[in-house]
Every structure is written in structure tokens, then in C-alpha cells.
Amino acid sequence: MMLNVRRANFNWRSQKVVIFPLVLIFVLCSKDGHCWSSSAYSGYGKQGSVKDRLLKSYDFVIVGGGNAGAVLANRLSEIPQWNILLIEAGGRDNVLSDVPLFAAYLQSTALNWNFRAEKQNGYCEGIENFRCAMPKGKGLGGSTIINYMIYNRGNPADFDDWESAGNEGWSYREVLPYFKKLENAAFKDTNQTPIRGKKGPVNVEYVPYRSALVHAFVEANKQLGRNIVDYNGDTQIGVDYLQATTNHGRRVTSASAYLNSVSSRPNLHILTNARATAVTINPHTKTATGIEYLWQKRKHTVRVRKEVILSAGAFQSPQLLMLSGIGPKQHLEELGIQVLVDSPVGKTMHDHLALIALTFLTNTTKESFDTDRLGVPEMIAYLKRGNGTLTVPGALEALAFIKSNISNEVRDIPDLELLFVGGSPASDHGTGAVRGSAWQQDIYDRVYKPHEGEDQFTIAVMLFHPKSKGYIRLKDSNPLHWPLIYSNLLNDEEDITMMIEGIKEAFRIIDTPVMKAIDARIIDTALPTCTQHSFGTDPYWKCLIRSLASTLHHQVSTCRMGPANDPEAVVSPKLRVYGIKRLRVVDASVIPSTITGHTQAAVYMIAEKASDMIKDHWNWGQKLNMDE
């Protein structure tokens, strides 16, 4: 893995951005031998060579070792009579990905599939080639390797809405035990009725380090009348410091939470660097019989006795279904793919909309995050005490949940989230966030570069429920070609109106006494794409949104869950693919619509619940202890 800077000639100040992570890697590798490997490896843990142990058939074959796949591999292999194969296209994570502060760097490495949305008019106008980045993690742990570790379940009403739409068994009351089952909340449960898990595999903690600037952000929200709340608890509306999937300051992935402890199970085989290319299906009985995959430059087929489970994510699960003949009939016929089931696979893609471009300067000194300020003391704090600036996920420190003045929602549900980042693209000299988001270089050079070294923070705006929705298509019948991703961001003018309202909420925070005390003021240099508008006016904000607003990596609904009478449903409430026996999808793609939260926690929950549904279906069900 290489962390490159853009300039051929650079001084020590910018060179340090690259050298510090490399020094950290050297120290960590010397300490515990945990270094990365991007090459193929056989086996996981101490099982020996997968090549020598691979069976011709398994009870269950799981495609994708990410957020959901790791959970399924763990829970299904609890039944010793079942043989499980987990197929993952990537390898393992690396020591750099363990360090939360370096999350931005991971977006432009081999741990990311580096998907790009197709070019469409009206958005991503400040992005290289006008194609927004669509990050998805590649390797055991999936997107939990590269994400910002935000743990946010969503709003209870989200899940009640799922059930009201015909998804029996998915109400908040019924999914809450699974949230509790997966969590190990390393802090006091402050809710009226305890609803935080204490014994689960996924450690959730408040980030050990807090900057002086994040305290100002939280206090500013309090001055606006917002309470400090557990946003995974009784109410979301309010503000709180970040709850992250870290453990003593180190990233927790689905692999470290669910696979490390079970890798020696003899009935669980994990095959990495193996690319699934299709589900094999008997066309007469419409029954899934196995998986075709590429491994070590050869094509292989593995048969399944019970079920194939796709957990390849919101882009690649629908891609695999379509390649296997399950999808929109006209689209598949145009590509010469035999149609087994005419299904709305990929026809709907919901996503959150985010703008991470409002940066404010302060009169403080050395209070914000900056790679120039990282050195031996920060390394020692991280290694010895699990504390310090390196434990903060990409400098993200707090979340505020807001129900805007223009919300049409009658229930107590926020429509906007403000995310506090204790730095900006200038904090790493444009080498992390700018590259990961694929911003055009002149935007960084004009707006952010002049402020390198100054104290600054960013308030990101996220819209929970955009009206715009996209879709997924195949490029062709070649399984190695990326799918075509059409985001359709900002197609609905109401989304722009809501985002502008979010920007104004950010300025309400800046107008509080605590922010005035540190002279918080926005960087008011106009983007090169927006110089025709007066800075700070609604037309300027609209231009800014069309230039830099993008995804926050929460795509859902491409294999939508719904009842049989739902014309957009691909899978049933039991997550079984309509029209094909012994085939399920278990990942973010089944989520019916955007949730009022981030997707990591919800996908963990879905996989935990799916594991029990599968056990019940095959008569190995075990009643969940609701008190756990």
C-alpha cells in the first residue's frame, strides 16, 4: 500500500504526512507482527491450506466476508453438523486500517473496490471526471475495514415502518434483541429502560480522545436547546459525542469481531482472494445449486446442499443476481443473459446525501487535528494506553440530530444530521480526504491549501431521507466488469432545499456564544465551480451542493425486502429471493429505504436476525434470550 503525495518536490512538512504512518506501521509490526498482506493466502487462523481442505459441496456457501457475511459465517458454523464456506474477493486488512485517525487514507487503497458512479448532469461537478466515489471495502470485514466506525442503529420508527410495509418480524420491538445481541456497549446505559447490549462481539465505545473544539460544538448545540442524548437510545434528536466500533481506540471490523474467535472451527472454511462470478441455478426447478468463482487464476464451482447466501453488498449482490439470470427481463435480454426470473433487481437504490465542505477557522492554537502534529507522544498514547488523537475515526468526533423547521414528518424523527470533524482537507495537506473523495485538485488548491497549519473544523451535513433515488445496471455479461452505478443525486429539487436548510443549521451553531468565543468563521473562498454566485447566498449553496455533495456510503434497497405484493421487492421478509429456491440475500441491499442512521449497525442486526431465521428454517433454531 502506498500513500502518495501529489507534488514531485515537497518539503518536510508535507513529507511528514506520509512518513508518520510508515513509522507507525514499522513500530506496530515490530510490536506484534500484525502487518498487512494483500497477496492471496490460503486459510484463516491455524487451519492450514484451504486448497487441501476444500470440499466439493457445503451446506451453506456465503459470498462476501464483510459486514454481514462474517456474522453469518460465525453464527451458522455454531451448528457443528453444518459445513460452511465463506468466499471473499479480497484478502485481510492491515495495520494501518486499525488506526481510526487514518480512515480517510483507506478510501484510496486496495482495501476499497474504488467504484465510481456514472457521470450524470447536475451533481458531482467538482469531482474528478464528474464521477463521485462510491467506496466499498474489499477484504475480510468488508466496509468495516475502511468506514468511519460510526455506530448508529437508526430510529425505532424506521423498523416499525418496515413492518407496516408488510415485512413481518422487522418491527423495532423484534429487532431490538438483535441489536443488543451484537453490542458490547462499553459505557453506562442511560436510557429509561436498558436497551444497550453488554455481551456482544462488536465493541461500541465513546472515542477515548476529545478535542477542545468538539466540546465547543457540543456546547453550541446545548445553547441552541439540544440535549446530550444517547442517539441509539430513547430519542435521537439532540447531540452526543461519537459512539464508535472501536476497542480501546482500535478499529473493530466484522472480521475481528466475528471471525477471529472461530477461525479454528473445523466446519468453517474461509477462502480469500476468490471472486464469485455467478450463482449456479437449476433452470427447471429454479433452485440454487452452488457458486462459480475464480481463484488462483482458475474457474471453480462449489455445490451447496442447503443455501447460497449473497452478502456481497449493495452493488455486487444485485450484480451477481443479474449475472445469474435474476433481474429486469429486458435488461438481461439485451445483454444476452438467460432470464430465469424477471425481478426488479437493482431498479431502486436509496442513499444518504452528504456535504463535507463547510470548514471554519478558529482563533485557537493547535487544538484541531493535523498530520503535522503527530509524533512519538501520539504513538505512545495509542500503543500503550489506547488513547490520544490516533483513536479518533478520521477526526470525526460528534453527531447532532436535527428535525428541521421545514420537516413534514409528524413524528419525533430527525431529517438532518450534522457531523463534527475536528479538521478539514487541509489537515493532511490534501492527501487523504481530497483523494478519497476524488475532489478536483483546483478546489483544494484555491479553497483549503492557503489555510494549511491553521486550526479549523468542518461541519458535515447529511440528509437522512432524500427523495432522489438511483439504480444499478450491468455493464455487460462479464462478471469482472464493475456494475454501472447511477446515483441520480439531486434529481429531486426538494433534496437541495433540505441540504440548504442543513447548511443554515450549521451556521446557527456558529452563531452561538461558545463559537463566537473562539472566533469561528467560515472559509469564504468561493469554489472554482461557483464563482458566478455571491458567497453565502442560496444560489451559491446550491452550486456548492451540486459540486461536492455526494454519498456517505450508505446505499440500500438494490435487492429490496418486501412482501410478495410489493412490485419493487426482490427478497421476502425472510430474505429469500423471490422465484428461486435456496437462495437468500443478507446485506445492506435488502434494506427497504434509507434509515435515520448509518448502515453499519443495521447490517449487523440484519445478519444476526437472518442467522436465526436460517437456523429456524432448517430446524436448528434456538430461542434468543431477550435479556442478553
Image (cartoon, grey):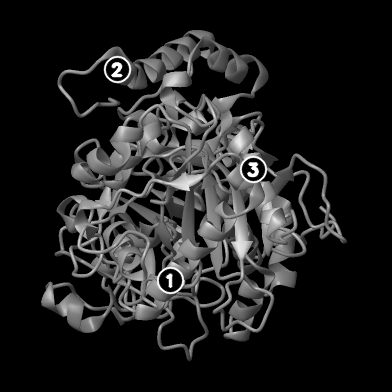
Percent x, y for residue 150? 56, 48
Q: Tell which residue pokes out farthest to the bottom in this image.
A: 565
- C-alpha distance separating marks 1 and 2: 43 Å
Mark sitting on residue 324: none
Determine whether, in the image, residue 72 is placed left or right of residue 280.
right
Determine whether, in the image, residue 450 is placed left or right of residue 251.
left
Can you identify the residue that label 2 sits on? 15
Assess disc 1: are there few (<14), some (14-19) or many (≥20) residues with their C-alpha within 10 Å of its C-alpha.
Answer: many
* Residue 538, picture quadrant: bottom left
Can you identify the residue that label 3 sits on? 216
Q: Tell which residue pokes out farthest to the top in this image.
A: 30
Percent x, y for residue 377? 56, 12
Number of callouts = 3
Percent x, y for residue 110? 30, 36
The structure residue drawn at horizontal position 25% and vertical position 15%, both measured from the top left corner, is 11
Can you identify the residue that label 1 sits on? 557
